[in-house]
Structures are given as structure tokens and as C-alpha cells.
Image (cartoon, rainbow, N blue to C red):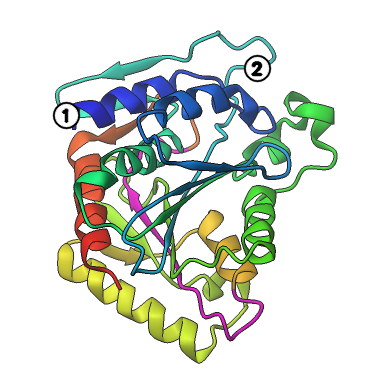
Amino acid sequence: MEQLLSILRNIAVIPSFSSYEEHLHPAVKALLEPVTDAEWHTVPENNLIVSVPGNPNRRPVALSSHLDKINHFGSNPPPLLPYRQESNRVTGQLDDAVGLAICIALARVSHRFHFPPLILLFSEMEESFGLKHHPHLLKNGGSGYWHGMGAERISHFLLKNKMIPSAVITVDTTPLFQGKNGLALYSAHWQFTGQMPGEKENKQTERIRKEFLTLDPEIILSNNTNDYLHYGVEMNRDKRLGIPSLAIEPAIFPYHQKNESVFLVDIERVFEILIRWLEQTE
């Protein structure tokens, strides 16, 4: 947990605002240096894909998080963003620094376990906040950018290069708990996207949903908009693929504001659940 929190701090302080995600790339690469057999893939614009070897007899699993933060600091942000760790929580610009830190930490411990191969998906422009509220703070005044473009580009790259995961698991943060701790599982992208799942996608999604709830029965089933919707749509336009897309999310409060807090217990729960799930998943 101490190593995970160190990774989180290194990510959270960097002003990698929407359309400026490249500011975070050097830190991500440095934090993944201990994964000496990782393979980096060239992806359009500010997205990153990293392959981490695992059990070759198992199908790869994709772990997703987004690189961009919302700019609440205006045209002259500080070189390092505020960050604070207390006895029970961390506070800073944590959407989606928390998810990114968990994915990197999982890659760094993967050699200790029997994980399947991992495909880390780190996306640009997950947030729509800046496009709606202050497009002038984005590159080119926000022109040519859209919400979810990173997940779309990553999906197209995976399909084109036949890097087909058995599932895409997004790690983000949820506003559901309004200041209390908790975890949410999103698993029905079609409620927002309208792209109904085929039989294979539906069956595999239900299987993974049950596996997560078996590992932690106190996870709350809910739904919200984030990159998991885009992966669900783009990876399943060919219904034969049937790739489940789910998101597991610790509580964050306040949401889409300065000084967001996430409970340490929730960060640890997500990390431990994913370790156990990756150990057992097909």
C-alpha cells in the first residue's frame, strides 16, 4: 500500500489537464521502469498502451484509466498541484490519478502472481468538463477534441493490431457515495450508449460481475459515464467479439472540484480485489 500511495502522489501532483496529457507521460514511463519486460506501443496523440507479459496460457486482460485531470486552476496553474495524505484519506486532483496509480501498481507487482498478460490503456480526453465549461483552457480552444476520444482511438488501435483482450476493466472514481466510503461497479454500458450487448458480451459481463461481487459482496452496482462506455461500444461493434467492459470505482468527494478526497481503505480494496480477480480470471 505504501508503494501504491507513493505512485499516486507522483501522478496526482502533475498538471496533466485535458489535451495536455503528455505532461504526465514521463512520470508514467518512469513509474513503469521496474516492469522491465513491458512493451510500449505507439498510439495516436496523447494515449499510451503498455503490454505486460503474464501467463501465456491465459488471454490478456486490459486495465484502463485516464490521464487527464480537470483544470480548476486557470491559465497559470502551479507547477505541482496540491496533494495531502492523512490517516484515512488522500486529497488532491485525484480523478483519475487514483485509477492510474492502481493500474501501474498492479503492473509492478504482476511478476509476484499468476496474472494473465496485461494491456494497460491510458487515455486522453476522458473528461468532458473542460470542453463544456472552459474550452479556452484546452489546446486550440478545444477545437478537434471530444469527450472519450482517447478510449475510441485506443479501441481502434487494439482492434487493428489484433490485441484483443478478454475484458476491459476501467479503474476510475465515483461520486455515488457523497462523502462516505464505498466501491461501485459499473457493468451495463448499454444503459447509456444504447448499443445492446450480443449474447457473448452479455454472458461474459454477467460472469465478471458475479466474480467481483463474490470477491467483495459490499460493492454497489450502479452506473455512470466514463471511458468504460466507449470501450464497451467500440470493442463490440463486431458482436462476435463479445468483450465485456466494466468499471470498478472507489468513492470520491467532492467530485469534479478542487481538493477531491478518496479514502485509503477504498484504494486498498480496489487494489486487492483486482489482484484476486486477476489471479482467478479465465
Estimate the x, y position of residue 199 in percent, counting from the top left. 49, 91
Q: Is residue 112 magenta?
A: no
Q: Is residue 118 left or right of residue 179?
A: right
**First in sequence: mark 1 or mark 2?**
2
**Picture coordinates of residue 77 (x, y %)?**
60, 12
Looking at the image, is 139 positioned above or below residue 240? above
Q: What residue type is labelled 2?
A: Gly
Q: Is residue 249 magenta?
A: yes
User: Label 1 belongs to which residue?
Assistant: 88
**Distance Cα–Cα, label 1 vs label 2:** 30 Å
**Residue 91 visible to the viewer:** no
> Is residue 203 in view from this perspective?
yes
Viewer-proximal residue among 157 and 53:
53
Looking at the rendered structure, which numbered label has been put on residue 120?
none
Say whether residue 30 is left or right of residue 142: left
Q: Name the residue under label 2.
A: 74
Q: Report the amino acid beneath label 1.
A: Asn
The residue range painted magenta reads 236-255
| Quadrant into which the C terminus falls | bottom left
Task: Name the image quarter holding residue 16.
Answer: top right
| Closer to us: 258 or 193 | 193
* Image point (40%, 69%), residue name: 59
Q: How many marks can you see?
A: 2
Left/right placement of residue 200 relative to residue 142 reads left
Q: Along the line of sight, which residue is nearer the eye, 150 or 39?
A: 39
Residue 2: image quadrant is top left
Q: In which quarter of the image is the N terminus?
A: top left
Q: In which quarter of the image is residue 235?
A: bottom right
Q: What residue is shown at x 55% (from left), y 8% (from top)?
A: 79
Q: Position of residue 101 (x, y in %)?
A: 37, 35
Q: What element carries label 1?
A: loop
